[in-house]
Image (cartoon, rainbow, N blue to C red):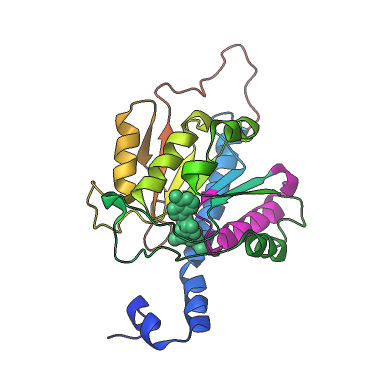
């Protein structure tokens, strides 16, 4: 068995080393987040896309959130944009993967309870990364999505609709609940990262892939694979949402937007 493969690491390395290697493995995500911030800032400045609000479903132990925090801090430094213009909303059980009976979720690598991180650990991480101290608005929503993602929760978020959504929840059932709940908040140009798309070897009847297909079949907008910056991490893939009608049309009477 070759060294430093996930298999080898899990068998021979102490947990602290495994965590260090995992953190390194997640680093490409940081550049991806940075490029997406640049891309959406440009689209937003010329009036054709959402910008600035990051939603993460499945915050787990905070590995991907740490990459976003680093990217956002660097982006603010490079552009001079004030951090208090940005928002992060994280959603999780904060108790790890919940048990599930759905056969579309069933994968041997996903035992219940795995990836547990607490709200206090996540807030501490974001404090350490200085996004909270610099004024980024952070909100964590605790609970199983099936219970926590209510119509009432949509209301306060309508003022801050997501521009970038990271779905790292492993299961078909969880992805499906998240996508259906999010739909009224979505505008064309919202970019999604699905972390676990290939867990079932691209079988479209299982996992996140099945949830995306069902979501698209409803016809109230759709997720299309986004080839620009397509694959930020080892397992993930980027998609872009569009509504049935392109809603960022130019207002012919308005003065031209600043370049
Ligand atoms: C792979 S982990 C997330 C890893 C995290 N993004 C990171 O980089 O450290 C998957 C997460 O999805 C959450 N999750 C899965 N199904 C859920 C559900 N139905 N409701 C709430 N959270 C769920 C689990 O609690 C778990 O923390």
Quadrant location of residue 53? Answer: top right
Q: Which residues are magenta?
A: 56-85
Residue in the picture at 56% in, 13% down? 252
Name the residue nearer the viewer: 155 or 231: 155
- Relative to 235, is 181 above or below? above
Name the residue nearer the viewer: 127 or 205: 205
Magenta span has 48? Answer: no
Q: Indicate the position of residue 231 as horizontal and vertical percent values.
A: 39, 55
Predominant SS of the magenta segment = helix
Figure quadrant of the C terminus: top right
Q: Indicate the position of residue 109 as horizontal and vertical percent values.
A: 33, 66
Q: Indicate the position of residue 14 as horizontal and vertical percent values.
A: 47, 86
Residue in the picture at 58% in, 57% down? 68
- Relative to 243, is 43 above or below? below
Q: Is residue 5 left or right of residue 119?
A: left
Q: Is residue 220 left or right of residue 65?
A: left
- Relative to 10, is 166 above or below? above
Quadrant location of residue 221? Answer: top left
């Amino acid at each position: 068995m070759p060294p430093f493969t996930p298999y080898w690491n899990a068998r021979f390395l102490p947990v602290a080393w495994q965590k260090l290697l995992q953190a390194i493995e997640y680093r490409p995500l940081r550049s991806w987040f940075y490029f997406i911030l640049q891309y959406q800032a440009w689209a937003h400045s010329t009036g054709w896309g959402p910008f600035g609000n990051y939603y993460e479903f499945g915050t787990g132990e905070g590995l991907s959130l740490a990459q976003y925090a680093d990217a956002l801090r660097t982006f603010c430094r490079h552009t001079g944009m004030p951090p208090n213009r940005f928002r992060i909303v994280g959603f999780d059980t904060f108790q790890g993967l919940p048990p599930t009976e759905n056969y579309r979720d069933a994968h041997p690598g996903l035992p219940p309870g795995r990836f547990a991180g607490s709200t206090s650990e996540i807030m501490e991480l974001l404090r350490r990364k200085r996004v909270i101290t610099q004024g980024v608005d952070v909100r964590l929503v605790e609970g199983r999505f099936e219970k926590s993602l209510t119509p009432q929760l949509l209301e306060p978020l309508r003022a801050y609709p997501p521009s970038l959504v990271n779905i790292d929840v492993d299961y078909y059932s969880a992805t499906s609940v998240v996508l259906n709940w999010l739909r009224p908040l979505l505008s064309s140009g919202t970019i999604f990262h699905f972390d676990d798309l290939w867990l079932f070897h691209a079988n479209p009847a299982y996992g996140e892939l099945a949830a995306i297909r069902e979501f698209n079949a409803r016809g109230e907008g759709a997720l299309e694979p986004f080839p620009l910056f397509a694959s930020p991490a080892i397992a993930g893939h980027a998609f872009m949402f569009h509504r049935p009608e392109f809603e960022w049309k130019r207002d012919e009477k308005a003065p031209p937007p600043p370049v």
